[in-house]
Structures are given as structure tokens and as C-alpha cells.
Amino acid sequence: MAAKRKYLNYTTPWGVDLARVATAGWTPFLIHESGYQPALENWNHQGVDSPFWRFYHNPKPGCHLVFKGRQIPLEPKNAVLIPADTVFDCVGPVRACHYWLHFTTNRPGVSFPAEPMPFPVDDTMRGLLSQLIETHQSSNDGHRLLHLASALLHVVFAKLDSPAQSLPERLSEVLALIARSPHTKLTNHFLAERAGMSVERFIRSFREHTGQTPAAYVLATRLRLAGEALALTDKTIDQIAVETGFPNRHYMSRMFARQVGCGPAEYRARQREKKGR
């Protein structure tokens, strides 16, 4: 006879219950690219309009970003986090010794302004950056780079997050429903009904707590989940379109290209090329 299991409770009186935090919508990072070049020539790009987030760190000084006329230096002692849909210039009067991450994420309850956010690099970040750069120089091991980059982003966001805005429980349930069932008909009326609110009040509350309209949030979630499926599974594009709630692959392809900069097939090919598949 099998021994009786003990300690069946998933929490204790001494720890912090993170289940509610997870339910509130902290979505794992989808990292598109990790890159390092010790001497990029002509690192001058005007009007960079990024549909994904970027993390920049330059181990050597000399280059900077320009945002609305303000210069933001890229130096060994600092890094810059750039939210999606932020327009900026890269200025490289010297060869750029440059490390970067391109990624997608979503954080309901905490909104960031669409502007570059510089912050100091502490010892923990410096150690992770050193390991990332060393891995790029020695092996370009994709699995190691993914783990190190994920750890770096978690450290960065842990430092940047202001006290998290508490999400109403009904809204948390709606966000979980969107992530769990993107294939369903997620209209404002349906979601408002699930939240127990009028449509007008629901839209107002949703925007206040997430910084997006429900429709924009649903589309972003569907695109994020489609990107994960393209990168991590062998499902057909038609299957992914159906499972993530798009009416057909053509509409998904158009929205995906607008968001990511390339179509689903090209995106999948790039991801597989990076993984050596």
C-alpha cells in the first residue's frame, strides 16, 4: 500500500502565496532575440519604431539614444529598457559595443510610459550581462542564452516595478479567461458580463487598470500566444489561427506582420534557424 502523502497544502503560514499574483496576469517573457556585437559600425538609426520591448546595454561608452530631443547615454554603469511602440534614434559616433534583447511581455496592473527608461546596473545584473556576453562570444548556446536573458529581465522588472496596482478580482478573472480561452468570442459585451459590469463601466475600468482597451488587449494576447505557438510547436498556421481566436490565417498573418514586422511563416523560420532546427 502506498504511503499516505503529507504536506498536501501548497502554501504554508511562513511563505508568500504567489498564486494570486500569477492569476493577475504576470505573463512570461517571450524573448525574440539576444545579441552582442563588440564593434558595430554605423550604429545610426533614426525613427526606430519597435513593436516589441528592447533592453540595451553598452559595455563601452560613446553611443546614446535620442528621445524627443533628450540624449540618453549608453554606458557600462547603466542600461535602458524601451517599451513597445516607443520611437527613438540610435546615435553611434563611435563603433558600438552593444548588447541587446528584443522581447514581448505583458503586465496587467502596471503600465509603463512609451519612453526609454534608463537605470543603473547593479552587481546582479552585471554578473548576468557578463555571462550573456561570454556565452555569445564562446558558443551562442541558445538554451543558456534563454535562461540567462530570462533571469536578467526578471531582475530588471523586479527593480522597475513600482508597488503593483491591485487588480479587482473580477478583472483578474477576465484577464485569466482571455489568456486561457483566446479562441472564444471575446466581445466587450461578453467580457463585461463576466465581470458583472455594464459595458461602459467595464471598458473604463479595464483601461484604467491595464492601460489598454479590451479589444487591444485581446488582440495583443492572441498575437503573443500565436508567436509562442509558432516558435515552440509544429502546429500549422491555420491551426494556430483557429486556436488563438483569429477568423482565418490571412487575418492573423496581417495582424502578426503589423505587430512583429514579418509574417508567421517567416517568423517561425527565423526562430527555427536560431535554434538550429
Image (tube, rainbow, N blue to C red):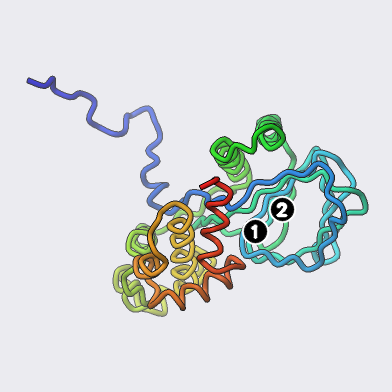
Check disc 2 and report the residue beneath it.
Answer: 117
Would residue 135 appear left or right of 225 to someone viewing this image?
Answer: right
Query: What is the number of the mark on residue 208?
Result: none
Between residues 261 and 27, which one lies in front from this camera angle?
A: 261
x 48%, y 49%: residue: 28
- Relative vertical location of residue 262 with respect to residue 20 in this rendering, above or below: below
Instruction: Report the label total.
Output: 2
Left or right of 169 on screen, residue 218: right
- Of 45 and 21, which appears nearest the observer? 45
Q: Residue at x 68, y 37 (%)?
A: 136
Q: Residues within 10 Å of mark 2 (few under 14, many from 20)?
A: some
Q: Is residue 192 visible?
A: no
Check disc 1 and give the amino acid type: Pro
Q: State the image coordinates of residue 105 (x, y, percent, origin top left).
A: 54, 55
* Residues marked 2 and 1 touching at CB (< 8 Å): yes
Q: Secondary structure at mark 1?
A: loop
Q: For mark 1, what is the residue?
A: 83
